[in-house]
Image (cartoon, rainbow, N blue to C red):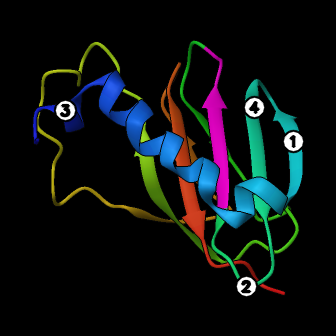
Amino acid sequence: DSEEKLTHFGIYRRLTKLRHEKTIQFGKMTAKNMDGVLVVSRVKKGNPGYVLAMNLNTEDREVDLSGFDNFPENIRVMESSLTSEDEFSIPDPEEEKKFPANAVTLKAGKSTVFTFVPKF
């Protein structure tokens, strides 16, 4: 249902499916506080990598995720939290989904889950 895609519940449902992924179950976890941005990554050889970035600040932040083990040059947005501004808007299909890992901009108060192919 396309309306569910735009709700917090829809995001939650899609993310709960990750709990069955081998990376989430058995992967190496790394957590860092990067200037008020909580970053948690999970990687497992032979499986997709995941990283959660939560900007707990009241302003936008740019973070460099390239220092994490096994990170590639680029990461791709998998899910992103909703804010009051975009809760009722249709996502822009032209919006960039792939970002350089060394320059990821996160909006204030927003969380994003990225996926990537780990380098081993």
Q: Is residue 65 visible?
A: no
Q: Is residue 35 visible?
A: yes
Secondary element under disc 3, as helix, strand or loop, is helix
The nearer-to-camera label among 1 and 2 is: 2
Q: Which residue is mark 1?
A: 31
Cα distance, mark 4 to mark 2?
Answer: 26 Å
| Left or right side of 85 for 48 | right
Secondary element under disc 4, as helix, strand or loop, is strand
Q: Which residue is mark 4?
A: 38
Q: Which mark is residue 46?
A: 2
Question: Above or below — where is 54 with respect to 113?
Answer: above
Secondary element under disc 1, as helix, strand or loop, is strand
- What quarter of the picture does the C terminus occupy? bottom right
Q: Which mark is residue 4?
A: 3
**Cβ–Cβ under 8 Å for marks 4 and 3:** no
Question: Above or below — where is 106 with respect to 110?
Answer: below
